[in-house]
Amino acid sequence: MADNGGGDAMIRLEKVSKWFDDFQALQDVDLTVYQGERVVICGPSGSGKSTLIRCINRLEEHESGRIVVDGIEMDDDTKHIAAIRAEIGMVFQQFNLFPHLSVLENCTLGPMKSRGLGRAEAEKLAMDYLEKVHIPEQAGKYPNHLSGGQQQRVAIARSLCMAPKIMLFDEPTSALDPEMIKEVLDVMIELAETGMTMICVTHEMGFAKTVADKMIFMDGGRIIEESPPAAFFAEPKSDRTKLFLSQILSH
Amino acid sequence: MAAMVRKKRRLHALDFIVLAAVAGLVGYVAYRVDTVLIYKWDWSAIPSYLFRWDDETATLVPNLLIKGLVTTIRISIWAMVVASIMGVVLGMARTSNRLFFRLVSWAYVGLIRNIPPVPFLFLFYFFISSQIMPLLGIDAAIRNASPETLAIAEVFFGPANLMSNFVSGLISLSMLSAAYIAEIVRAGIQAVPAGQREAGQTVGLSRFSIMRYIILPQAIERVVPPLAGQFISLIKDSSLVALISIQELTFLAMEIAISEQRFFEVWIFTGFMYFVVCYACALAFGWLEQRMGAHRR
């Protein structure tokens, strides 16, 4: 477990709210994530989990409250947005690989175009990370030729090539066939062991028990419960958490 | 990908009956026309307008129809290039975050698409020839050009004495086609899933880089078929610039038809020449479509 008490706050959210037209997706969300901490967020669909992590790198814009990432305030200043995005990698439910580029090119595009690396350097970096996710042999293929599990591992490698301090996972295994979930979770566990700060929206409770330092349960755009995994699974405080856990753990 | 439905490659008995009926109808109409129309077909003039014997050099040299065809191909290729550049820029502007860009592009596309091409050509040609051409200084450039430069320019833009005429037609035609290409490009851009842009943002790319390396390549790949259709339309629409005296195939065919008084022969043959060019273009795009991105699917 990360040392939460003495660690530096990597991400701080204060009273963050967001609306989609009349629907309030986030209501006064407070959250602090420390360096090296692994946070797992769960909750029913429409509870605001994805919106919450998408606000952290400005894929969604929050309407009130504060978001501070590694000391940088998230506001309308494009320099701040770019600086924060440079620190954060993200993995999506639908992978979102670039279908017109090979696996290797998917990984080198960011380093070459935004960090200004040369091709050779970027390719070496990409191959290092493709080895870390155990698919260097797929480097020359196009995303559509890979299985879902392989595609998601490429997506993880692509993010890591930007050397982020924080990784966000938005239901990374929800679009996968059951037999491929493990290969992706294994890579995520290995990543967690390197000390990466991670926020994962997932319903994989086995994974949560293995790696999480902190469990968060959301419902109706609010954080209902926030506790260490042992306490979270053994004795959830809120009835809604109990109900949710009973529904997803019963099978 | 799911198993594709196998397309049948053979005609059925019923298809042959329908084809026979259509052939019979065409034959009957031809017969009726032949009995009503008293016309003596004479194709003998056509070959001499394709090539003529030049006594000075003692060789066959291209005559009006071939010259016109070359001008048509030249103007079409250039207009495709210019209209594509304009169309991509306008199409991007249509999806811009900035209201100003969206408005400019919207106004341009709306104006061009809702005026018939002929009034547009007449009005715009007057404006180009009186305002834009002096501004571009093409006539002056031609006058001052060395023979070597002029020789190279003639390969690309045709004979020097008609070059400024050619460029006016080219600009007019490009402006017409750009509006349609802009709409095709806009549709292509909007068909790229939002997740692609988001993934680009998370790997630190600028808005420009996302457009250049992620959105546009996928958008263009998606719109190759409608773009091919637009390019073929452009070749056919190039015949409209005959109205503003650009000396391309239709303009010269009109002159021959009048001077020879052989309307049917000249126009049927001219139509055939357009057909060959357009069909070749369609085949080329069909081939391109097959090649493009096939290795990624």
Image: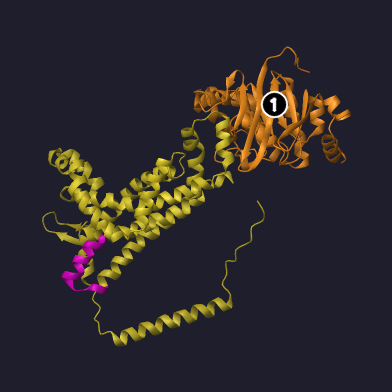
Chain colours: A orange, B yellow
Q: Farthest residue in the bottom direction? A: B35
Q: Main secondary structure of the magenta part?
A: helix
| Kind of residue at disc 1 | Asp
| B89 sits to left or right of A2 | left
For the residue pair A29 and A167, the one nearer the viewer reads as A29
For the residue pair B190 and A188, the one nearer the viewer reads as B190
Q: Identify whether A3 is placed above or below A104.
A: above
For the residue pair A40 and A48, the one nearer the viewer reads as A48
Identify the residue at horizontal 51%, vertical 49% (top origin). B222
Give the total of numbered labels: 1
Residue A158 visible within the image: no
> What is the magenta range?
B248-264
Image spot of residue B173 (x, y percent)? 30, 53
Q: Identify whether B20 is placed above or below A145.
A: below
Image spot of residue B147 (x, y percent)? 15, 40
Residue B271 visible within the image: yes
Residue labelled with disc 1: A30
Image spot of residue A64 (x, y percent)? 61, 30
Q: Is residue B245 magenta-colored?
A: no
Kindly identify which chain the residue marked by label 1 belongs to.
A
User: Where is residue B137, by image quadrant?
Assistant: top left
For the residue pair B178 and A84, the one nearer the viewer reads as A84
Q: Identify whether B157 is placed above or below B234.
A: above
Identify the residue at horizontal 33%, vertical 46% (top origin). B82
Image spot of residue B208 (x, y percent)? 46, 34
Under circle 1, the secondary element is strand
User: Where is residue B57, by image quadrant?
Assistant: bottom left
| A124 sits to left or right of B22 | right
